[in-house]
Amino acid sequence: MEIVDVTDRNSDLLEKLTALWRRSVSKTHTFLTGKDIAEIEDYVPQALKKVEHLAVAQNNGDYLGFMGVEQHRLEMLFLDPRYIGQGIGHKMVEYGAERYQIDEVTVN
C-alpha cells in the first residue's frame, strides 16, 4: 500500500473516487438515507477538484481510500469499506500530519 498526492484530477479518477465515497458513506453514515447520499454525491466531484491537497491510498491500482486537506485542516477522509479497520485511515492521517501539517479536523 502506498499513499500518493494526486496531481491529475481527471474525470476517470473523480468517478472512481466518487464511487468509493458512495460505498464508504453507505456503509458508515447509517444516519443518511439513500436520497440524502444521492443529493450529497452530486457535490463530491466538485469538492475533490477544489480541495487544496488530495491524496489517495492505493495498492496495485486499487484505490483503498482518499483524503482532502485544506489549509492544514483534514476536510475529508473516506475508505473503501473492504479496507476499514486495517489501519489505512491511521496511516493516511499520519501522512497528512507529516506532509500537510494537519492540525485540525472538520467533522460533518
Image (cartoon, helix red, strand yellow):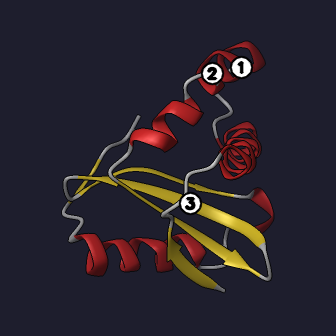
What percent of the width, then of the height, locates residue 37? Answer: 68, 24
What percent of the width, then of the height, locates residue 93? Answer: 40, 71
| Residue 60 marker | none
**Circle 1 sits on which residue?**
38
Tell me the amino acid under the disc marked 1. Ala
Between disc 1 and disc 2, the foreground one is 2
Q: Is residue 33 above or below residue 68?
A: above
**Circle 3 sits on which residue?**
66
Q: Regarding mark 3 in the picture, which secondary structure is present there?
A: strand
Q: Regarding mark 1 in the picture, which secondary structure is present there?
A: helix
Tell me the amino acid under the disc marked 3. Phe
Q: Is residue 50 above or below residue 66?
A: above
**Circle 2 sits on which residue?**
42
Residue found 51% across the figure and 64% down from its top: 6
Residue found 26% across the figure and 70% down from its top: 100
The quarter holding residue 22 reads top right
Position of residue 50 in the picture relative to residue 41 (left or right): left
**CB of mark 3 within 8 Å of CB of mark 2?**
no
* Crowd band around label 2 with a 10 angstrom C-alpha radius: few (<14), some (14–19), many (20+): few
